[in-house]
Image (cartoon, rainbow, N blue to C red):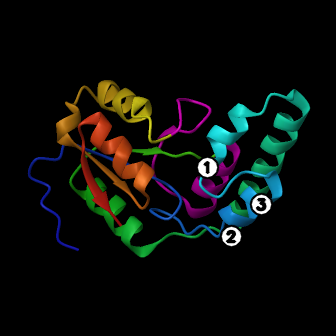
């Protein structure tokens, strides 16, 4: 992979499908929850008006994420990008739509050397750019000098909304 790091002062990574493999079956999860195929799962959950149904749905998703986290392993491209960033002494972070519990498990099981992590509990989920912009402010780096690396349209949309460079993996 040939990337020009000339104008990059910090790199933020998505987690699933970018740093680690994920086998979450979103179609099956949506079907179980009664979420339309064309809807975002997290938006659907927030639209549920019955508190018990919402709690049960959140727990179901958490259970699926934790089961997936048990088997999630490093992806070669993600590992290479993290090691390259570290060798260039660039600050690195993770922004994910995952729960904090599943994220911590994936990071611990794979010894991912990234400490700055924002999950859906910390900021509105992508494609909202809030988490990305928060990290850029924390680093005191202009968003245009940050690179966000992801594997899904929400990642690209969040990067564009934040005014960051984007790399699809």
Instruction: Give the image quarter of residue 88.
Output: bottom left
Q: Secondary structure at mark 1?
A: loop
Tag 3 or tag 2, which sits nearer the N-term?
3
Q: Secondary structure at mark 3?
A: helix
Q: Secondary structure at mark 2?
A: loop
Between disc 2 and disc 3, the foreground one is 3
Give yes or no for residue 114 being in the magenta stretch: yes
Q: Which residues are magenta?
A: 101-125
Which residue is most to the left?
A: 6
Q: Is residue 42 above or below residue 142?
A: below
Residue 13 visible in the shown view: no
Q: Are marks 3 and 1 in contact (CB under 8 Å)?
A: no
Residue 144 in percent (x, y) is at 18, 38
- Mark 3 to mark 1 CA distance (whole Å): 11 Å
Residue, disc 1 = 39
Image quarter in which the C terminus is found: bottom left
Residue at left 39%, top 34%?
Answer: 129
Tag 1 or tag 3, which sits nearer the N-term?
3
Residue at left 44%, top 41%?
Answer: 127
Residue, disc 2 = 71
Residue at left 58%, top 70%?
Answer: 73
Foreground residue among 157 and 5: 157
Image quarter in which the N terminus is found: bottom left
Between disc 1 and disc 2, the foreground one is 1
Residue, disc 3 = 31
Q: Neighbour class for label 2 at 10 Å: few (<14), some, many (≥20)?
A: some
């Amino acid at each position: 992979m040939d990337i020009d790091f000339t104008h990059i002062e910090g790199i933020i990574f998505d987690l699933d499908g970018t740093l680690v493999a994920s086998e979450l079956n979103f179609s099956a999860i949506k079907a179980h929850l009664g979420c339309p195929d064309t809807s975002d799962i997290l938006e659907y959950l927030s639209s549920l008006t019955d508190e018990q149904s919402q709690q049960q749905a959140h727990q179901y998703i958490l259970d699926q994420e934790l089961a997936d986290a048990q088997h999630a392993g490093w992806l070669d491209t993600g590992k290479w990008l993290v090691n390259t960033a570290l060798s260039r002494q660039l600050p690195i972070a993770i922004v994910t739509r995952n729960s904090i519990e599943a994220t911590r498990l994936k990071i611990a099981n794979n010894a991912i050397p990234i400490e700055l992590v924002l999950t859906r509990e910390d900021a509105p989920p992508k494609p909202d750019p809030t988490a990305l912009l928060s990290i850029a402010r924390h680093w005191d780096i202009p968003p245009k000098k940050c690179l966000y690396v992801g594997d899904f349209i929400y990642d690209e949309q969040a990067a564009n909304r934040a005014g960051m460079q984007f790399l699809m993996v």
